[in-house]
Image (cartoon, coloured by chain):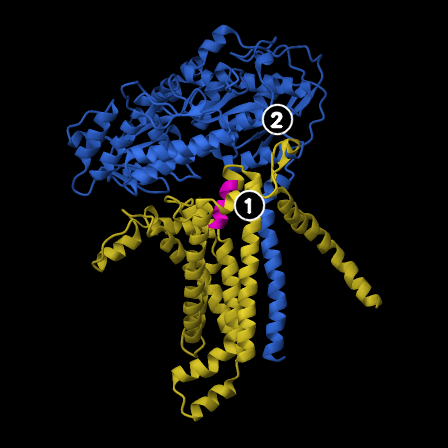
Amino acid sequence: MLESRWGYAYLVPALLILVAFTFGPALFVVYISFFNWNLLDPALSHPVGLENFTRLLGSARFIGSLVVSLYFTLATVAASALAGLGIALLLNRHTIGRSTARVAVFTPYVTPLVATSIIWIWIFNPQFGLANAVLSAVGLPELQWLESTTWALPAVIMYTLWHNLGFTVIIFLAGLTTISRELSDAARVDGANAWQELRWVTLPQLVPTILFVVVISSIGALQAFTQFYTMTGGGPLGATTTTSYLLYQEAFVFYHTGPAAALAVILFLITAGLTLAQLRLGRNRGATA
Amino acid sequence: MSSGTSIHSATRALRAAVVLGAAALLVSACSSAGASTAPAASNAAGAAPSSAASASGAAPASASSGGQSATITFMEAMSSGTLKTTLDGLVSQFEKAYPNITVTLIPEPNYATLQQKEEASVAAGNPPTIGQAYENWAATYAASNAIVPLTSYISGPNGVSSSEQSDFWTGIWQDLYLPDGKIWMWPFNKSDYVMYYNQNMLQADHLAVPTTWTQFAAAAKAATTGGDWGLSMNPGTSSAPANGTYMFVSMMRAYGGHLLLNGKPDLNTSAAVQALTLLATMEKEGALKVGTNYPGQTALGAGKSLFDMSTVASYYYNQQAVGTKFTMGTAAFPNGPAGQGNAMQGTNIVIFAKSTPAQQQAGWTFMHWLTGTQQTATWASGSGYLPVTKSGLAAMSSYVATHPYVTIASQSLQSARGVPAQSWFTEEQGAIATALESVLINHESPQSALATAQATSAAAASSGS
């Protein structure tokens, strides 16, 4: 009993920091989302009820940003899970150069987003970039990439995959070390081929890892900001304006504090809702597996 | 541990992670409001100028503060390279001349951070004494009574004489006013746009340096051959205007258009349509290409494009990009039927209202001193910004001898106009960038794109955001 009291006492400093710098401001954001808030002189602020929310939900820019966020999230989560799993399966084999390959795959993840985003801006430069040089070399038409409303978002997705794939691979590699080798051996003895072993033995045991990757990647994708800020500034014509970027724009470019707070609340609800849905889905699958 | 248990544990851990992550996201939305970026405390009772401290161009400060000392804080973004060393040097000079005034610089890494820190410090009730501010920031601050007008200082004992006023370039002086007709700002770091060109390419095509926008378009078209083109530019986005945005604004003004008419957005005009149509035609002919990350500099430096339309601040970087590949020329922005319409860049200085009267007086003394002839010349030569006065330009002849573009660009300050002093101008600026994107990337008609820009800007103006 005494021990647990001391335990709580040790938690107090961290808890105070969390309350002061995380939970308190978060609650304050919810509060100001119901105001026409004057950042410079809060005395000039006045309550507007749900107006910030209703305006936002009827705004084409907000709906457009949701579509962009959904596109980005689905593409990055699906591609990073599939590619991450594939690469992890390859790197899980005992082959020469495996450690070097693991380091190579993980390295982009530890590079600074801003610095590598700028490098990829050069790669996607329509006149001087590597991407168009490669397309030309294989006889494909050159693209405008970041200057195209069609290709700007896929370009940012490609960069994000390059940057984040290492993390996904490492998680899958960790997951692969926990699965039972006996089951795989038994399956092979029973005549299962490689695909059957993967489909019926490996994947079912990886469900918790897959779930973790999907949830963490989804949260990361919904909150992604730096690459959009650096590579496209939300353009061209809003083609890469995600909900997170719109939040930045409203809060720190236009200084629409009340609407920005309402947007933050909505984004929180979306992120939390999606995550809980994924977890529930994963739990149900786990129960039936 | 069974897999079911591990899923359950993972679920709980993830739930916690979700809550924490989302909370962090929410915090990020208000971090600038909540962050206390209070400047160093200013404990001085009053300004005490030295009677011997008559900086050229700026009269010695009033002795009305009775010899009390004052410490003032200056929040600024001149935080690196020669900007920092030159400003530090000027502050030292000032403190020697005015031993009773101490100036504490609060450097910020860039303008975006500067704005956030200034707003946060005002919201926290602890702003600096003075700070750099764009015209539309000043309008926002004034609307919240966060800054003071300079009228009483200008007409006060350490005020501004009519001869001193006439020494400022016309555009610089006009830039100091807010729409209420009062002066709220004092000039500091100013630049404007010039035309950089590949002299070898121009000569090879037997072309003269264009002096009108029509000639400019013709030269760009003539240069568009064999893998070369006229101009690369960044049109900007709704949240981040770029050089292309300001180039269009300059063109629009040169054709007789305005950003504002009677305090309201005025974008859907024949002048704006003419300017945008010229750019659309250039793009259609392949003479203009859009890009990001200083595309004009990249293309000019690679010897692929004829022009780069950038501020004088780009001179050094353009010269680095060009190297010895060819001769880079500089010229004034072309004229239109209504003359030159250069877009002034850079900030002014404002005095925040929260500081004591003695600090405010000391702040005025410092900012007024900065625009004295010698100080202006020192600042412009050291920083690369333009001299805000004619006498300042005359006092930097040796610098001008090696940087001839300074004369061209300084004289353009006579007609250049800054950012309109309206709190909602950021949205109008974004709407202009969006119109450029619509025309140059999505090939929408200039009329339609400008009509949309006008509607967006008018909505922002009416909501007063």
Q: Is residue B250 in sight in this rendering?
A: yes
Residue B88 position (above or below residue A104):
above
Dividing the picture into quarters, in which one does residue B303 lie? top left
Which numbered dot is residue A53?
Answer: 1
The chain drawn blue is chain what?
Answer: B
Q: Amino acid at mark 2?
A: Ala
Give the SS element for disc 1: helix
Rendered location of residue B448, percent (x, y):
31, 35
Dividing the picture into quarters, in which one does residue B414 lie? top left
Instruction: Give the chain letter at badge 1.
Output: A
> Residue A115 or A138: which is nearer the viewer?
A138
Which residue does the image show at 43% across and 74% down from the upper left? Answer: A91
Q: Residues within 10 Å of mark 1 (few under 14, many from 20)?
A: many
Q: Main secondary structure of the magenta part?
A: helix
Residue lying furthest right: A2
Which numbered dot is residue B146?
Answer: 2
Which color has been applied to chain A in this rendered view? yellow
